[in-house]
Image: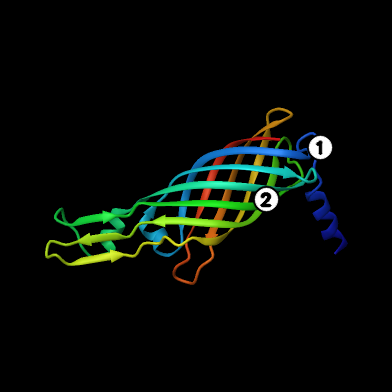
Amino acid sequence: MKRSLLLLLCLVSISSSVQAQGITIGVGIGGALPQGGRFNEFWLPGPALEANVGYMLTPSFGIQARAGYNLFSLNQDAVLTAAQAGGPDIALFGGGADIKTVMVDALFYLSEIGPVQPFVLFGLGYFDPTIEGVIVIFTNNQVRTISPIEENRAGILMGAGMAFPVSNHFAVTVEGRYHSALAEAGRRIGHIPITFGIQYR
């Protein structure tokens, strides 16, 4: 037990030369992977943008407000395969998808690994998916659909990343985050943004 406590204290002890108290501002760009049920099956990865502003309460712990925008494209081949159809005479409509998030995170910086500063984060917030329904029309006028998802929900965030300091106030960051909307089984959707960014602190 004592050994575990000592290890935890070592992990959250941070060099003040890398992370100081005060305001932080960051932006990032990358890609996002769809997760959950039909969203994962019928939509493809797309671009991800995010921005955050926060305050470091201690050299190793801070709070962030984070906004993200993630865009996805329809996997038409997967839709047509699921509809058990094929051929040039089939019409397919809809399928645009994006997810907007506004989260509040707890950010923990761990001990340095050489010049690298690893961190983990956990958050809660607002999850706004706009996933259009898909309509497949066959040559015999039969129609099959995939229901839209447009319900605003609470969501959770878990992530980890690394900061590479390039000056006293700026660092290059790379991070991966798992976002999931809180919903009943079968309607749960999420995404995994992986972004590269710049952080001012």
In the visual, does 14 lie left or right of 66?
Answer: right
Classify 10 Å Cα crowding around label 1: few (below 14), some (14-19), many (20 and above).
few
For marks 1 and 2 on the same chain, the one whose residue lies earlier in the sequence:
1
Helix, strand or loop at label 2? It is strand
Image point 56% across, 39% down: which residue?
A: 28
Amino acid type, label 2: Val
Q: Residue 103, position in %: x, y? A: 60, 52
Image point 45% across, 68% down: which residue?
A: 187
Q: Residue 134, position in %: x, y? A: 30, 59
Q: Residue 172, position in %: x, y? A: 63, 34
Quarter of the rendering containing residue 37: bottom left
48 or 68: nearer the eye? 68
Q: Residue furthest right?
A: 2
Amino acid type, label 1: Ser
Q: Residue furthest top?
A: 167
Q: Which residue is mark 1?
A: 16
In the visual, does 56 lie left or right of 152?
Answer: right
